[in-house]
Amino acid sequence: MMTILLPCLAMGEESPIGTAKTGKGHVVVIRSGEEIPIQIGDRLYQNDIIQTGADSSVGIIFEDNTILSLGPKSEIVIDEYVFVPQKGVMSMVTRMLKGTACYLSGIIGRQSPESVKFQTPDATIGIRGTQFLVKVEGR
């Protein structure tokens, strides 16, 4: 029974999925309804909501070396992130609610581009290349 459950637990929400590598201004993560200021080096988790204030930005590096940078007045939700390459299980699904973002593919986007989805209010961006910029007008 434990051999069945352990791989599932390893892919669960409790494992960190990325790290804040750069930050400027007022940047917070909303986790389980709590707003927490982000500091460089802080770990991020699946289902985190990341928000930047005016004149603020944050750079995040995920476990697969994906780089995501958010500009001022941005908000993004990390709906799903699974990176277990030894089992061939990889997925990244994010929702950009507002603001600007720059995405640079890591291992997931290069090895399994169909497993990466970047959703905006108007469209879903399927990853076919390695880099893109997006701007979503505020709601």
Image (cartoon, rainbow, N blue to C red):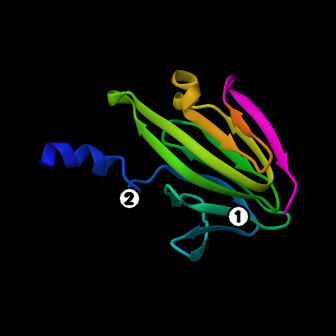
Task: Please check the rendered image and state whether residue 128 is part of the magenta-colored stretch, yes or no.
Answer: yes
Task: Please identify the quarter of the rendering in which residue 137 is found.
Answer: bottom right
- Amino acid type at image mark 1: Gln
Mark 1 and mark 2: span between their CA atoms? 21 Å
- Say what secondary structure mark 1 lies in: strand
Left or right: 5, with 58 as reference point: left
Label 1: few (<14), some (14–19) or many (≥20) C-alpha neighbours in 10 Å: many
Q: Nearer the viewer, residue 24 or 77?
A: 77
Instruction: State the extent of the magenta-drawn residues as a range.
Output: 127-139
Q: Nearer the viewer, residue 3 or 37?
A: 3
Mark 1 sits on what residue? 51
At 75% across and 47% down in the image, what residue appears?
A: 120
Kind of residue sitting beneath label 2: Glu
Residue 106 on image: x %, y %: 57, 31
Which residue is the extreme one toward the bottom? 34
Residue 130 position, x and y percent, is: 68, 26
Q: Is residue 17 depicted above or below 37 in this figure? A: above
Dot 2: few (<14), some (14–19), or many (≥20) neighbours within 10 Å? few
Residue 14 point in image, percent of width and height: 38, 59
Q: Which residue is at a point 72% across and 30% down the rendered structure image?
A: 131
Instruction: Give me the residue at 44% from left, 42% from top.
Output: 82
In the image, residue 77 lies at what x, y percent? Answer: 63, 56
Q: Quadrant of the C terminus?
A: bottom right
Q: Secondary structure at mark 2?
A: loop
* Residue holding disc 2: 14
Mark 1–mark 2 contact, CB under 8 Å?
no
Identified at 37% across, 52% down, the residue is 12
**How many labels, in total?**
2
* Front residue of this view, candidates 43 and 78: 78
Vertical relation: 30 (above or below) 121: below
Which mark sits nearer the N-terminus, 1 or 2? 2
Based on the picture, tell me whether residue 131 belongs to the magenta stretch.
Answer: yes
